[in-house]
Amino acid sequence: MERIWAGPFGEHRFEVRQTPGRLDLFMLVPPGQEVLGYPILGLFQAVRDLFLASVSKWLRSPEVEILRIAFGANILHKVADRESGYDVMAQYLPLSGLDARRMQDFNMQVNIQRDLHSNPSIKINRVIRYSVIQRRGYYITNPAQALEEFNVRLDFDVSNGQESTGFLNANSLVDLLKEMSTVVDEVANGGFK
């Protein structure tokens, strides 16, 4: 059985979802404030810092026992058209031969493990999905106006591996989550390494 607690959080909405053995914390846009069908929270670094500040107090609680922790984000990089999107995507990926003029519907998901810098005994998974999307919407005016936008979409799910055993050190949870969030910054700003 899923339980949900939600409420306003500044100009955003904060939601806690609990299912047996799992607790998810989300920062969302208020209902009805999507842009072309997507929830746009703002610039990644500012939203990330606000989210981390809000969950840090809770994570420092001595009652918290956590086996796995993850940080996820969806980032949109606005581009002029589909071909430009594939040109940008090629900069993120260590692949040669991406032909932006002939490609359509290319998407890729990859999971690359690496050691956690702050604790090399912990491996983190970096699951990243790459795609180019076309978003469309309409303003209801007379006559109706169509809107169209192309984006490179990067979806991140960064977590400690399932092979982790035992509870994570409660004193290091905030630092662990912060380091996971920097993985998103590293890839979004410098490509895949």
Image (spheres, helix red, strand yellow):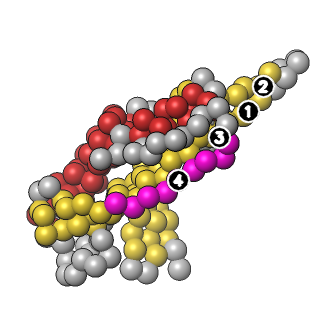
Determine the residue positioned at 32% across, 76% down.
Answer: 162
Label 4 CA crowd tier, 10 Å (few <14, some 14–19, many 20+):
few
Residue 95 visible in image: yes
Q: Nearer the viewer, mark 4 or mark 1?
A: 4
| Amino acid, disc 2 | Ala
| Mark toward the viewer: 3 or 4 | 3
Do the CB atoms of the residues marked 4 and 1 lie less than 8 Å apart? no
Secondary structure beneath dot 1 equals strand
Q: Say if mark 1 contacts mark 2, CB within 8 Å.
A: yes
Report crowding for label 1: few under 14, some 14 to 19, many 20 or more residues within 10 A (C-alpha): few
**Foreground of the two, 98 or 175:** 98
Q: Nearer the viewer, residue 154 or 52?
A: 154
**Real-space Cα separation, disc 3 to disc 4, in angstroms:** 13 Å
Which circle marks residue 103 in the picture?
3
Between residues 39 and 72, which one lies in front from this camera angle?
72
Q: Residue at x 23, y 50 (%)?
A: 178
Seen at 34% across and 35% down, the residue is 189
